[in-house]
């Protein structure tokens, strides 16, 4: 997804407890029964993504981009571990959407902080571009690194 589709500055997100309750209520009947097969879980995730994109915009596609697969969303693992009882699963989806949005907003702040000053020469723009690419690329790593509460997560081995 291009940044223009995800940039929080371009896509408003009005959120409050009423919206959380409305979204939860929409998701609860979509949740498959406990013990459903994996394909049913995959279809549920796809259907939730369609709902979120229709409701909030394309930026919402990353709601399930789990830390287990290099993403920033800690509340989601996969269909087998994150889809369970209907109410709990719906609340988890809401939590994940908010985590994803927070991460996008953090990225937007980082991009703004790393942008070259107006009128910067080519060398300064190049230096800022390198920083803007390198720093955000490493930011998910901090949320996917192994921790005592999540041993074995992340791709880096600490010695």
Image: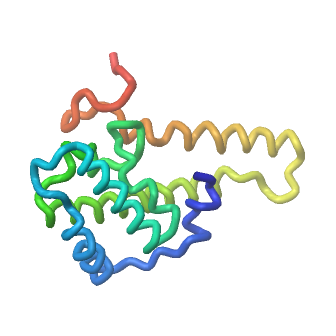
Taking the spot 29% from the left edge, 31% from the top edge, the residue there is 153
Q: Residue 107 sits in which quadrant?
A: bottom right
Taking the spot 23% from the left edge, 59% from the top edge, the residue there is 92
The answer to whether 52 appears left or right of 91 in the picture is: right
- The x and y percentages for residue 36 are 15, 49
The answer to whether 10 appears left or right of 41 in the picture is: right
- 54 or 21, which is in the foreground? 54
- 27 or 110, which is in the foreground? 27
Residue at the far top in the pictured view: 159
Residue at the far bottom in the pictured view: 18
- The x and y percentages for residue 87 are 14, 66
Taking the spot 45% from the left edge, 62% from the top edge, the residue there is 60
- The x and y percentages for residue 110 are 58, 53
The number of numbered discs placed on residues in the rendered structure image is: 0
Q: Is residue 56 above or below residue 157?
A: below
- The x and y percentages for residue 80 are 20, 43
How has the structure been colored for display? rainbow
Quarter of the image with the C terminus in it:
top left
Taking the spot 88% from the left edge, 43% from the top edge, the residue there is 122
Q: Is residue 96 above or below residue 69?
A: below
């Amino acid at each position: 997804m291009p940044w223009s589709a995800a940039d929080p500055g371009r896509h408003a997100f009005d959120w409050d407890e009423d919206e959380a309750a409305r979204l939860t209520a929409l998701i609860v009947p979509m949740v498959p029964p406990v013990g459903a097969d994996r394909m049913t879980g995959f279809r549920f995730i796809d259907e939730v993504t369609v709902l979120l994109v229709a409701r909030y915009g394309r930026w919402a596609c990353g709601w399930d981009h789990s830390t287990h697969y290099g993403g920033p969303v800690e509340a989601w693992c996969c269909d087998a571990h994150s889809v369970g009882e209907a109410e709990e699963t719906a609340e988890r989806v809401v939590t994940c959407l908010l985590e994803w949005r927070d991460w996008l907003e953090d990225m937007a702040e980082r991009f703004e902080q790393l942008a070259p000053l107006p009128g910067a020469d080519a060398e300064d723009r190049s230096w800022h571009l390198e920083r803007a690419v390198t720093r955000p690329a490493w930011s998910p790593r901090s949320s996917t690194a192994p921790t005592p509460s999540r041993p074995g997560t992340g791709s880096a081995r600490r010695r």
